[in-house]
Amino acid sequence: MAAFLDARPVFKGHVLVVPTAHVEDFHSLPAAEVGPFWSAVQRVSRAVESGLEAQGTFIGVNTKISQSVPHLVAARQTSWRGRTPTRSRASRSSS
């Protein structure tokens, strides 16, 4: 597994976690890799939340439609009370 900062972060602490082998989407992830994938997401989430002293975390998995690259990714975003990371870039740019 690999983790890196999003090039266009929605919020501070927006980190992407991906399998290093090509996996097109969540449904294609082999059963034997589900545990290691989510363990990596959990480790990254704990570290970033602690490092940024955040109040919470939002974790999302894009499957097909909203992927800019056809590869499994878990997006980990930091959250604080009163600020939610679930608002899309499109809705932010139109407001």
Image (spheres, rainbow, N blue to C red):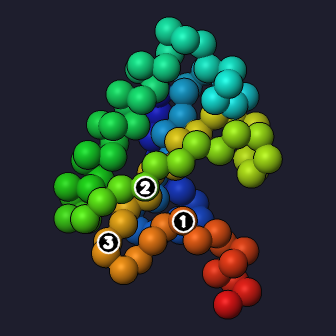
State yes or no: discs 2 and 3 in contact (Cβ < 8 Å): no
Amino acid tagged 3: Trp
The residue at the far bottom in this view is 95
Q: CA distance from mark 3 to mark 1?
A: 12 Å
- Name the residue located 20 percent from the left edge and 55 percent from the top edge: 50
Image mark for residue 86:
1
Neighbor class of circle 2 (other Cα within 10 Å; few <14, some 14-19, many 20+) is: some
- Name the residue located 58 percent from the left edge and 43 percent from the top edge: 61
Neighbor class of circle 3 (other Cα within 10 Å; few <14, some 14-19, many 20+) is: few
Image mark for residue 67:
none
Question: Which numbered disc flags the more N-terminal residue, 1 or 2?
Answer: 2
In percent of width and height, residue 88 lies at 64, 69
On the question of residue 54 being in view, the answer is yes
- Name the residue located 73 percent from the left edge and 86 percent from the top edge: 94
Amino acid tagged 2: Phe
Q: CA distance from mark 1 to mark 2?
A: 8 Å
Image mark for residue 80:
3
Q: Is residue 9 above or below residue 4?
A: below
